[in-house]
Image: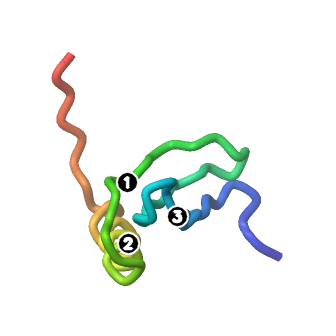
Amino acid sequence: MGDPVAGKFELKTTKSGQFMFNLKAGNGQIIATSEHYTTKAAALNGIESVKTNAADAAVDDQT
């Protein structure tokens, strides 16, 4: 049985034929949107980068 609050990445094609992804929370809310990539491989690379780097990302509170 999976984690009920786990998020997921949705890979999409833009109207201009580029690629991008959304990171959605377990409740379906979009919590992050990527830049546009010219290739699918680059977008997948972006997803892997977020998976790798976000776990240890610091919070820079500039409020």
Could you say which is closer to the camera, residue 31 or residue 54? 31
Q: Earlier in the sequence, mark 1 or mark 2?
A: 1
Which residue position is annotated with label 2?
A: 43
Mark 1 neighbour density, 10 Å: few (under 14) some (14–19) many (20 or more): some
Task: Identify the mark at residue 34; answer none if there is no mark.
Answer: 1
User: Quadrant of the image for the N terminus?
Assistant: bottom right
Give, as a three-letter code, the residue at label 1. Answer: Ser
- Verify CB contact (< 8 Å) between mark 3 and mark 1: no
Residue 34 in picture, x, y percent from top left: 37, 54
Q: Are marks 1 and 2 in contact (CB under 8 Å)?
A: yes
What residue is shown at x 18% (from left), y 36% (from top)?
A: 60
Q: What residue lies at 69% left-to-right and 52% top-to-bottom?
A: 26
Estimate the x, y position of residue 49 in percent, counting from the top left: 30, 72
The amino acid type found where label 3 is placed reads: Thr
Q: Which residue is mark 3?
A: 13
Q: Quadrant of residue 41?
A: bottom left
Label located before the other in sequence (3 or 1): 3
Q: CA distance from mark 3 to mark 1?
A: 12 Å
Q: Residue 48, how many percent across, how many down?
A: 37, 77
Is 40 on the left-hand or right-hand side of 57?
A: right
Which residue is painted at 38% across and 72% down in the image?
A: 43
Q: Nearer the viewer, mark 3 or mark 2?
A: 3
Quarter containing the C terminus: top left
Secondary structure of the residue carrying tag 3 is: strand
